[in-house]
Amino acid sequence: MGELNVTLVAVDRKIWSGTASRVIARTLDGEIGILPQHEPVLALLDDSPVRITTTSGDVIEAAVHGGFFAVDHDNVSILADSAELGGEIDVVRAREALERAKAAGDDDAARAAQERAETRLKVALNEQRHAGDARHA
């Protein structure tokens, strides 16, 4: 079927690169799934998890906050304002950040902080769950 060459970078560092069979991300227009031979795409990313299924079947999940998503000739570039892999996120600190964001009020900045914290927590908890599944396999 083919494969995708995926690069996920944040402003400050390269997060992940490799080959994948599928990439799922959320743009400002909604969720998008990319398979090999997809039409070209250029979109703005929403604060959300990005899921990359590698050609070996592993799932890489990252909390992505803003940036661009581009697809061209089986090359997928995810250029995020900031991004963290699930295993890099401290669950306790993510929960604390979520509680602080919820207590901060209901203005645009507080809602944005809450959305970022929810994304980070979701990705971190998914990573913990997958790590637990792997230990019990």
Image (cartoon, rainbow, N blue to C red):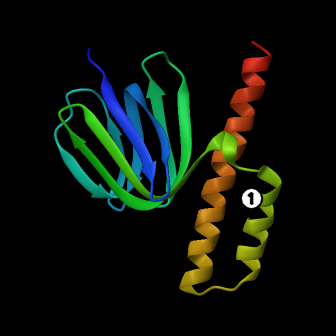
The answer to which of 18 and 93 lies nearer the viewer is 18
Placement of the N terminus among the 4 image quadrants: top left
User: Horizontal placement of 89 versus 68: left or right?
Assistant: right
State the image coordinates of residue 122 (x, y, percent, origin top left).
65, 49
The answer to which of 17 and 52 lies nearer the viewer is 17
Residue 45 visible in this rendered orientation of the protein? no
Q: Residues within 10 Å of mark 1 (few under 14, many from 20)?
A: many
As drawn, 99 above or below 23: below
Q: Amino acid at mark 1?
A: Ala
Could you tell me which residue is drawn at 65 percent across and 60 percent down?
118
State the image coordinates of residue 26 (x, y, percent, origin top left).
41, 52
As drawn, 94 above or below 22: below
Could you tell me which residue is drawn at 72 percent across and 19 percent down?
134
Residue 77 sits in quarter = top left
State the image coordinates of residue 32 (x, y, percent, origin top left).
34, 45
Could you tell me which residue is drawn at 54 percent across and 22 percent down?
58
User: Horizontal placement of 97 versus 83: left or right?
Assistant: right
State the image coordinates of residue 98 (x, y, percent, origin top left).
73, 66
Look at the numbered disc 1 and give the secondary structure of its residue: helix
Residue 49 visible in this rendered orientation of the protein? yes
Residue on which disc 1 sits: 94
Placement of the C terminus among the 4 image quadrants: top right
Residue 130 sits in quarter = top right
Could you tell me which residue is drawn at 30 percent across and 21 percent down?
3
User: Horizontal placement of 41 versus 9: left or right?
Assistant: left
